[in-house]
Amino acid sequence: MNFCSQCGARVSLRIPPGDTLPRHVCDACGEIHYQNPKVVVGAIPEWEDRILLCRRAIEPRHGKWTLPAGFMENHETTAVGAARETAEEACARLGKSELFALIDITHISQVHVFYRAPLLDLDFAPGTESLETRLFSEDEIPWDEIAFRSVALCLRYYFADRKSGRMGIHVGAITTPPGHE
């Protein structure tokens, strides 16, 4: 960051009084510009014993499979954001959702929040960010073609819970970049 979004003056990276971390601070008006983690929201759309996955039409990870998910928008709840992302990426409608997983991804400053929710019907199709949408049973999941480690972790939680007969809420973390596990 070079310029203040409030007044347009130059900013400096320094620790403001009363803080412990360097922040971009406006040299003219004193505005402190905080940079915080981004929230990604998504869903595990369920239909009987299968879940809906989307094959990505965009980077990153073009052509790989994922749960419908994306960045949360201002003025929406995480559950509403997960339903919106599912509608955008899979043209699918969800029933009542339940919080399922929260995964911190510290090396890219993101938090991924996933909800379980039943599909209301089988009227789904690829949205503009998807090449393909498809229902998968557990033994059909293309594990080597899953786009993101957070999605793979969420799916592992999901299938382990389903096997145990008890769905819980999971908290996990991915702290290293890919290839550094």
Image: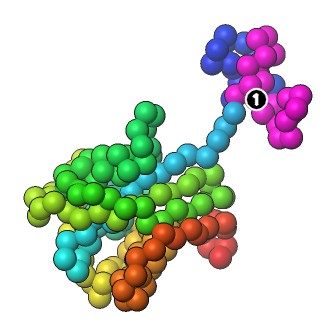
Whether residue 154 is visible to the viewer of this picture, yes or no, is yes
* Residue 26 colored in magenta in the image: yes
* Label 1: how many Cα within 10 Å (few below 14, some 14–19, many 20+): many
Please report the bounds of the magenta region as a residue range.
13-33
Residue 28 in percent (x, y) is at 79, 11
Here the colouring is rainbow
Quarter placement of the N terminus? top right
Q: Quadrant of residue 177?
A: bottom right
Horizontal side of residue 141 vs 7, given as left or right:
left
Label 1 secondary element: strand
Residue under the image location 86 percent in, 40 percent down = 20
Q: Is residue 155 above or below residue 6?
A: below
Residue to which mark 1 is pinned = 24
The image quadrant that residue 15 belongs to is: top right
Depicted 136 relative to depicted 147: above or below? below
| Residue located 61% across and 67% down the image | 173
1 or 29: nearer the eye?
A: 29
In the rendered image, the vertical position of residue 176 relative to residue 26, given as above or below: below
61 on left or right of 102: left
Toward the viewer: 53 or 177?
53
- Percent of width and height locating residue 94: 23, 56
Query: On the picture, is 125 further left or further right than 21?
Result: left
Magenta segment's dominant SS is loop
In the orientation shown, which residue stands out farthest toward the right? 17
137 or 161, which lies in front? 161
**Which one is nearer the viewer's eye here, 102 or 1?**
102
Measured along the vertical axis of the image, is residue 34 above or below residue 95?
above
> In the image, what residue type sits under mark 1?
His
Q: Residue at x 20, y 63 (%)?
A: 119
Left or right of 76 on screen, residue 92: left
* Quadrant where the image shows the C terminus: bottom right
Residue at figure coordinates x 52%, y 62% from the top left: 102
